[in-house]
Image: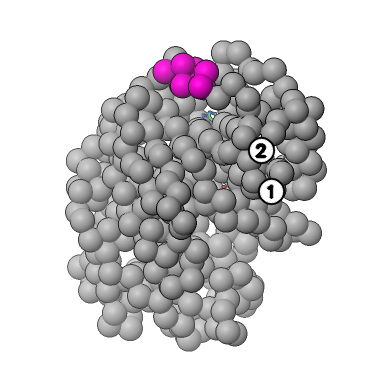
Amino acid sequence: MERIFAVPLKGGAVTDVYMLSSMDELSGKLQEYDRSIFISDENASKLVERIPEGAVIIPPGERMKGWDSVSRMLSGALELSLARDGVFIGFGGGVVLDLAAFASSVYMRGARLVLIPTTLLSMVDATLGGKTGFDYKGIKNLVGTFYPAEAVLIVPETLRTLPDSEFRSGLGEVVKHALLSEDTRLWKFLKENHDRIMARDSEALSEMIRLSLEVKIWYITRDPEEKKGIRSALNLGHTFGHALESVNGFSISHGEGVAWGMHMALRAGTALGITPENFREQAFSLLSLYGFDCRYPIPDDGFPAFMKAIHSDKKKKGGSVKFVLMEGQGRPVLTALDDAVVRNAVAGFN
Ligand SMILES: NC(=O)c1ccc[n+]([C@@H]2O[C@H](COP(=O)([O-])OP(=O)(O)OC[C@H]3O[C@@H](n4cnc5c(N)ncnc54)[C@H](O)[C@@H]3O)[C@@H](O)[C@H]2O)c1
């Protein structure tokens, strides 16, 4: 087991990130947490040989990301008589981890928290940064806290059982990190190791995750509470992507939406003279290498619904929606866009 990062947090706390080579190694590490509650879902928990006593295992899926699940976790902790020094261990994808982290943040005003991500998206995106929460009255992540984990344990081997669509969803975020990094290592690694990554070779995944996390850490440590606009760069592709997801009735995955959205942001950037055309082309070619279809146009009659979805994006601030555009690799800029620029970006391919 190797500690790959010690991420500094507000108030001098640190999240230690460990890379583990196998589930056996994880079992050994978990022995250290004797006063704990294990939280997972019905899919992820299949990866564990022996589910700890008193564990809370919820059905899978975003629809479970609500107060009832949190309540089950708090009741479970109480039944185990956990005190404030007890550990909430989240084992699963972003849904399980956001819920477990929220529950731990409010249990006795804050219990200990260890996160074990088992989807690519949660490994590269959902475990660092301290965002916790659940959906309320149909609004995603309406209720939440900032509460970073004391440790994040990553076992790339767990990705072997992940469905392809979920794996690709995570890859969309990895490509996003490559675009957002001034350092070219992740981009180069993705270009040169496509086959190993797609074959889910643990060593290749481990390196890809490490490089991807480096980028996320760079952004979150400069803006831990998302107050300076730096961390907002991590929303690259998200405003366009969420709108596409919503007009498609959420039938496309989050990663597909983000990949498409990144390309739309690059197209809008080139139209405005912000993004160099050769950078857009290189990014497009990386997205295509990983099989993302980024040429899907919004038809004219779908545009009003698309714009409605854009304007209801929760990142709306002060009445206008800020888009993340790119001046080049690792150089994001936040800007409002006229509807006409958005329309030209999402229509008129070829
Ligand atoms: N806190 C943050 O900073 C942050 C960042 C990004 C996303 N999120 C949240 O993460 C959630 C999405 O996370 P996700 O994409 O991991 O989805 P998810 O948690 O729903 O997992 C996707 C599916 O994969 C299954 N699964 C998980 N691990 C598996 C494995 N190893 N093998 C087989 N199946 C497995 C799950 O049961 C589920 O069916 C959203 O709710 C989003 O809001 C949070």
**What segment is highlighted magenta in the picture?**
25-32
Residue lying at 57% horizontally and 13% vertically, measured from the top left:
49
Give coordinates of residue 317: x percent, y percent.
Answer: 56, 79
At numbered mark 1, what does the secondary structure look like: helix, strand or loop? helix
Question: Does any portion of residue 315 appear in the rendered image?
Answer: yes
Residue lying at 19% horizontally and 54% vertically, measured from the top left:
184
Q: Mark 2 points at which residue?
A: 84
The quadrant where ligand 1 appears is top right
Please indicate whether residue 301 sits to the left or right of residue 282 in the image.
Answer: right
Give coordinates of residue 169: x percent, y percent.
Answer: 47, 45
Q: In which quarter of the image is the C terminus?
A: bottom left
Q: Name the residue under label 1.
A: 109
Please indicate whether residue 193 sits to the left or right of residue 171 in the image.
Answer: left
Q: What colouring method underlies this structural image?
A: one colour
* Sequence-wise first label, 1 or 2: 2
Q: Main secondary structure of the magenta part?
A: helix
At numbered mark 2, what does the secondary structure look like: helix, strand or loop? loop
